[in-house]
Image: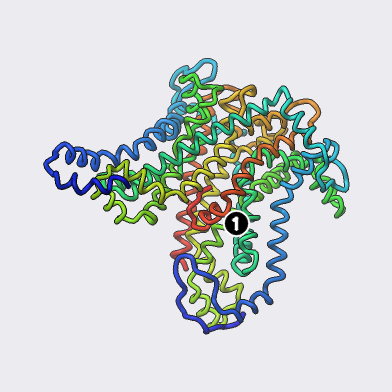
Amino acid sequence: MTVTADRPAQAPAGRPRRPAGRGRRLRRLRERAPLTYAGLLLTVLLSLFPLWWMLVIATRTTDAVARFPPVLLPGGEFAANTGRLFGNAGAHFTLGLWNSFVASATVSLSVVLFCSLAGFALAKLRFPGRNGFTVAVVVTMAVPVQVGIIPLLVLMQWLGWRGELQAVIVPFLVSGFGVFMMRQYAAQGVPDELLEAARIDGCSTLRTFWSVVLPVLRPAMVVLGLLTFMQTWNEFIWAVAVLTPDNPTVQFSINQLNESAYARDFSLMFTGAAYATLPLLILFAVFGRRLVGRIMEGAVKA
Amino acid sequence: MTAASRAPQDARRGTDRAARLRAALDTKAAPYAFIAPFFLLFGVFGLFPLLYTAWVSLHDWSLIGGNEGFIGLENYRVLLGDAKFWNALLNTLGIFAIAVVPQLLAALLLADGLNRIVRGRGLFQIALIIPYVTSIAAMAIVFSTLFGTEYGMVNQVLGVFGIDPVNWRGGRLSSWAAIAVMVDWRWTGYNTLIYLAAMQAVPKDLYEAAALDGASALRRFWRITVPMMRPTILFTVIISTIGQMQLFTEPAVFDTGGAMAGGTQGQYQTVMMLVFQEAFRYGDYGYGSAVSWVLFLVIVVLGLINVLLTGRIKGAS
């Protein structure tokens, strides 16, 4: 590597740009680029191949799975497979898709609203116990909630919610991670002067939150909503534990196809998998850039 | 804000004590009202089940009979002598080890690569994060098919290189490897982006000083980049630990029988699969809760070990 002393020593903190020296950049590119690009391209191919193959098999008949050399281009069976999928008596796929939409949308809206409220309060309002509550939120983030599924199931039985859609909605209406994320964002993004101005104007705290704070928080709310939607959509162990095969979520439904005892119908399973993935990919196409940005800021937990 | 124009007059009217009282109450009570939904809901559906798990684990408690009495640590005594529990713990730790180490190393290398290039970086970032936004169960179905013994594409490709077909579900290491591939496929890109962000925040003058001292690129990577990223690496290790100890969806879908047995010999039954099997297949809530609670303790201990180890490395260097 070459030594360069042609730019100021200190780099800007936060999100620094690439070094400014153009000569250096070109030389680095020439030195490093081919191997680096090859490695990255290979990784991208590996990342996308399973998705591509899912689409290929979803558009073909089941025997395509086993053919060698492998079939790598889509066929014309997608409509037929879709018909079989939605008509499959054991999978209840249509209901599963609908249930997952309702659950994911409800949970996302609730998480975004409640976490914004709490995050704003913890970041910007002064009240006794604030630090303690903030620490409590951080601790809840580390709690592996899955560990509590047995008592949660007992709780659902008491409530009579076993097998009902609300069983996969109500337990997830808030998230410690969400509060933490909104708190961090509000602490940086909401200027105290703005709150002070609203207060002098006689706004109540709720009014201030609604008209002043929420608009500022919107970028973080979008990402939190997207992540929550993904998480709820993907919820598996809890759905399988508490729901029944005739009222499933979409994940539960495709797992039914996967487990059905008779001859395994791969194109049917893969069509189901494709429909279970598609909504997430569409959301990603719309909001993906923002998601990447937030992950890069270290603001997103798994 | 429409209130803005009216407010000064209101303030001048000052004598309105009710309004001032309301404002004071608002200032005092609003913060608690704002955080209440979170703490209430988390308390009922997050904290209570976790603590109640410990309580249930001290009872003879089944799906059919309900709570049949306090039995103290009996479930834990059984657990310590239960080969199935140790097997599941071994599987979980084994899959964790062979998944997470390559995953984080690959993420470091990829992040370093992304950090070097200029053109196309944004596109690569998007492409690498796509696996993270897919449906876990759906992709587990796809991977399970890829790892099929007779028809699976992985075996077909291995065959091209003269390697005999592997029975991926049959062996312990082979099934661990297949599951680890699913996990890494999903999470490598995510960790790459986190590492990339941390790398970009390393002050550039450190590199220049090292370069002036004649340190090689590799040396700079290990002596500057990695140490500067220690908090980030610790973050990803802890997040991965918490997640992987609860690994369920990938092995459960890989096991097409639906019994949560994790293969014929339980060679890839994870702890969460055992919890599921004991509690929801066999209906033994008490024992399932004991397994859950031990898993929770394992996660806490591993988290503490992570923090301590990192602290010591920090102290040593």
Mark 1: amino acid: Leu
Which residue shows up at 14% across the image and 39% down it? B16
Q: Is residue B82 left or right of residue A48?
A: left
Using the rendered view, name the quadrant where residue A12 is placed: bottom left
The structure residue drawn at horizontal position 64% and vertical position 60%, both measured from the top left corner, is: B123
Looking at the image, is A155 positioned above or below residue B304? above
Which residue is at the front of the view, B274 or B151? Answer: B151
- Where is B193 relative to A127, above or below? below
Q: Chain of mark 1?
A: B
User: Is disc 1 surrounded by few (<14), some (14 to 19) or many (20+) residues within 10 Å?
Assistant: many
Query: How was the colour assigned to the protein in this rendering?
Result: rainbow
Is residue B77 visible to us here? no
Query: What's the residue at 51%, 27% (across, down)?
Result: A167
Q: Could you say which is closer to the camera, residue A234 or residue B166?
A: A234
The residue sitting at 24% across, 40% down in the picture is B26
Q: Is residue A179 above or below residue B213?
A: above
| Quarter holding residue B280 | top right
**Residue A22: image location, x then y, percent:** 59, 79
* Residue position for label 1: B104
Q: Which quarter shows the N terminus of chain A?
A: bottom right
Q: Position of residue B88 (x, y in %)?
A: 61, 37
Residue A10 visible within the image: yes
Q: Residue B27 in the image: state x and y as whole percent.
A: 24, 43
- Spot occupied by residue B229 in the image (x, y as percentages of width and height): 50, 63
In this image, B274 relative to B168: left or right? left
Give A238 or A275, whichever is nearer the viewer.
A275
Where disc 1 sits, the SS reads helix
